[in-house]
Amino acid sequence: MFRILIVEDDTNTRKLMKAVLSANGYLTFTASDGLKALKVLDSEHIDLIVLDIMMPNMNGYELTKELRSSSYDLPILMVTAKQMPTDKRKGFIVGTDDYMTKPVDEEEMLLRIKALLRRAQIVNDHKLTIDKVVLDYDSLTVTKGSEVQTLPQKEFYLLYKLLAYPNKIFTRIQLMDEIWGIDSESTDYTVNVHINRLRKRFENYPEFTIETVRGLGYKAVKNI
């Protein structure tokens, strides 16, 4: 289930968007301005943002610029009453992926969201970037500057899975099923071994850490 953050200061519009997106199978989160949106992003994995421009405290342009400068590459759909070409150009310059003007056609919004998520999925299925670190799914490599490491397949898949969902806790059983397969005869101790190898391999990488959540499993944390 894709997770969408609606950032809109008008209460009625925010509730309407939430209802439409929830009815179409999306898990929705809301914020009334850019500062509150940043707090949501700190604690939740978000796949796409639907973003108003004119808001108090931190407007849509400022939030988009802040996210792009912090290496957040998730899709952003600006939805706003500002209809001038200069407003649209400014939106694209700061880093939005698409732009709609109010009043919003609900069907068009859903189609645009689907298209943005599809494009993002294609990219994310092959490469993942954390600051200067790039994970290439096709070559099983982790690159940082001139340093290139080719990982064993299971190690790479494990690292990629964790980093694709920062701060999300995965149990050992979940990771075993997804990386090794449900029919694997390996035990969940295998996950522990691979986690320890990854920690050792990337102990000098300040960009991310893999944390043990006692009694539950593991999560990756981006330190940027």
Image (cartoon, rainbow, N blue to C red):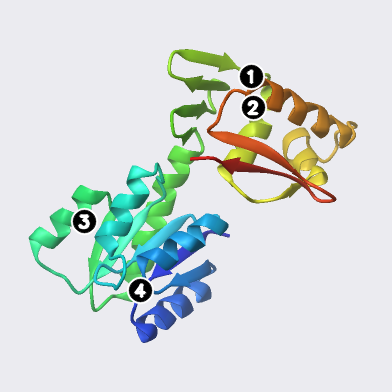
Whether residue 175 is visible, yes or no, is yes
Whether residue 97 is visible, yes or no, is no
User: Could you say which disc has been placed on residue 156 in the image?
Assistant: 2
Where disc 3 sits, the SS reads helix
Q: Closer to the N terminus: mark 2 or mark 3?
A: 3
Which residue is rendered at x = 78% and y = 42% of the image? Answer: 177
Residue hosting label 1: 151
Give the vertical position of 16 relative to 91 (above or below).
below
Q: Amino acid at mark 2?
A: Phe
- Residue nearest the observer in this picture, 137 or 132: 132
Q: CA distance from mark 2 to mark 3?
A: 36 Å
Task: Locate residue 192, reporting x and y percent.
Answer: 82, 33
Circles 2 and 4: CB atoms closer than 8 Å: no
Q: CA distance from mark 3 to mark 1?
A: 39 Å
Q: Closer to the N terminus: mark 2 or mark 4?
A: 4
Q: Amino acid at mark 3?
A: Gly
Q: Closer to the N terminus: mark 4 or mark 3?
A: 4
- Residue nearest the observer in this picture, 23 or 92: 92
Q: Amino acid at mark 4?
A: Glu
Where disc 2 sits, the SS reads helix
Of badges 2 and 4, nearer the viewer stands 4
Residue hosting label 4: 8
Residue hosting label 3: 91
Circles 3 and 1: CB atoms closer than 8 Å: no
